[in-house]
Image: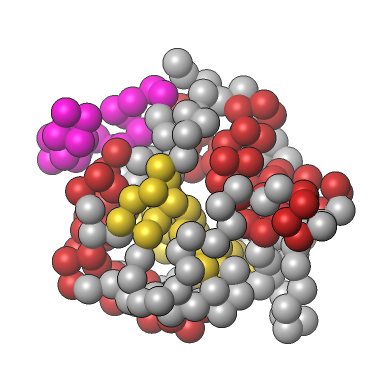
Amino acid sequence: MIRLLFVLLLALGFSALQIKSSYSFAVLKYNGGGDWYANPTSVPNLVKFCNKELKSNINKSVATVAVGSSDIFNYPFIHMTGHGNVVFNSQERENIRKYLLGGGFLHIDDNYGMDAFVKAEIKKVFPEYKLIELPANHPIYHQKFKFPKGLPKIHEHDKKAPQGLAIIHEGRIVLYYTSESDLGDGWEDSSVHKDSSAKRQEALQMGANIVQYVLGGQLNKS
């Protein structure tokens, strides 16, 4: 029922965020052999942090949704990660494009190793757009938590600077890709990567900024 209402409202020009005041986040399941299931504690921990620090009302239960499924329209915020190959077929590309242009949001976090693959798929989904690096003064880095230098680096891989790249449609960020940062690793339980409390806090704060920027005034409704 919710999905049908979402599709109807999209047709009428409403965004995904206008449908439900209480909602769930989801992790994107994709094909190609990449480990889409990496970092299983990441998004649940981010949700917990947002509900505490932003006083949001996000469902603690995080869903898994396939990129080609119509269920994708039930979630205003979808997270994607992994280390390897990513392949979308034509139906999946059409489905996620419709979702994103209709009001949805996708955060992709390279867990190291998926960069070339995911960028190729993004280009197929949005051939008319380019991934644009957001400057350090962009509002996404200046929500409740301030990051004057832009996207923080949580894990070091090949000594490259972290990049926050976006697809922007009609003035709205529909896709935000974090590369050379590993935010998701920083969101995981402390026992997984043995990151310092300060580094984990930095990662969670940046994640909360993304959520706050994307969902805005919808966060505190119940």
139 left or right of 10 in image: right
Whether residue 147 is visible, yes or no, is no
Instruction: Magenta stretch: give its range.
Output: 1-22
Quadrant position of the N terminus in the picture: top left
Q: Residue at x 61, y 75 (%)?
A: 112
Q: Position of residue 170 (x, y in %)?
A: 34, 53
Q: Is residue 222 visible?
A: yes
Image location (x, y in percent) of residue 200:
77, 50
From this view, report whether residue 217 is shown above or below residue 205: above
Residue 184 against residue 2 in the figure, above or below: below
Residue 54 is covered by the magenta coloring: no
Q: Is residue 73 above or below residue 157?
A: above
Residue at x 25%, y 45% (from the top left corner): 71
Of the 4 image quadrants, the one containing the C terminus is top left
Queried whether the magenta region covers residue 2, the answer comes back as yes
Identify which residue, 204 or 123, lies in the foreground. 204
Residue placed most toward the observer, 98 or 84: 84
Q: Quadrant of residue 10?
A: top left
Asked if 222 appears above or below 50 in the picture, the reply is above
Direction front: furthest residue:
191
